[in-house]
Structures are given as C-alpha cells and as structure tokens.
Amino acid sequence: MLRYEDLLDRLYSRLPTKGPTQPIELPQLDVVHVGLHTHIKNFKEVCDRIRREPRIVMRYLLKELAAKGSLDDSNNLTIFSRISSQTLNTLFNRFLMSYVRCSTCGSFDTILKKQGKVWIISCLACGAETPVKPV
Ligand SMILES: [Zn+2]
C-alpha cells in the first residue's frame, strides 16, 4: 500500500518541469523540404492528438505564413513554399496556446465547439468554456 505522500511525489515527478504552458507531451511537427515545398509528415497524427480538424490547423498556419498549401489524401499538409521547421513549430505552438490550451486550468485536453460564427474551447479537464476568435 502506497502512502499518500509517495503518491504525491510520484505525481509531481511526472509533471513537466517547464510549467503548464509547455505542452511537452505533444509531438512537434515533423517537417521535410521537397524542392520548394514543405511537407509536414505527421500533420494528421498531431491534429488527431489535439482533437482539431486538420483543415482548421492548416488554415491558421497558411494565414500566418501568407502561404498556399493543401492537404493530401492522408490529411498531411504540404505548403507551397519553403518554411523552416522552427518557424512552423513556433506558429504551431502559438495555435496550441490560442486554440487548444484551456485559459482557466492550462490543460490541453480540450475540444473546439462551433456554434454558428462563435468558436468555443471546451475543456475536458475542468469544464470551462472559452470563446475564441474563429480562424
Ligand atoms: Zn480547463
């Protein structure tokens, strides 16, 4: 039988050291350059993980980059410009902060609800609902 303190120790040792704003359990975008194009190999997998439609994440990235691109048959993203992995991951992190992270408890375990023109981040951890600007 574990003591309560041991359980707490265990819990805390698993917490990310950089604080709750760093979604370290989420994968980074796996970026490859093919000629003048940029391909994100794990785009669908990452979108599934954060429970967001690839289309929405794509729209956000392309808008911020002022670039064109499209989803392929397996919902992975190709951007028709050369964008560095660092730039893409920085933008992706910004998306996570604005459209995935619950502003009440900091959890990334959320879903995005659309009610007409209003988008709402609904937190599966604490139940908070936060309206956000549509992408
Ligand atoms: Zn929350």
Image (tube, helix red, strand yellow):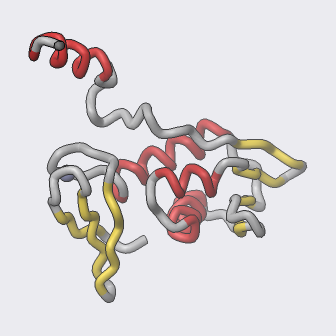
| Residue at far left of view | 4
Measured from the top left, where is residue 84 in percent x and y?
68, 41
Measured from the top left, where is residue 78 in percent x and y?
74, 59
| Residue at far bottom of view | 116
Q: Is residue 9 above or below residue 133?
A: above
Q: Is residue 18 above or below residue 38?
A: above
* Image quadrant in which you'd find residue 30: top right
**Relative to the observer, which residue lies in front, 8 or 58?**
8
* Image quadrant in which you'd find residue 133: bottom left
Measured from the top left, where is residue 32 in percent x and y?
77, 42
Q: Judge from the rendering whether residue 20 lies leftward or rightward of residue 94; answer left or right.
A: left
* Quadrant for the N terminus in the image: top left
| Residue at far right of view | 35
* Residue at figure coordinates x 70%, y 59% from the top left: 76
Measured from the top left, where is residue 93 in percent x and y?
45, 44
**Relative to the observer, which residue lies in front, 96 or 82?**
96
Q: Judge from the rendering whether residue 95 lies leftward or rightward of residue 53; answer left or right.
A: left
Q: Is residue 11 above or below residue 74?
A: above
* Residue at figure coordinates x 77%, y 69% from the top left: 73
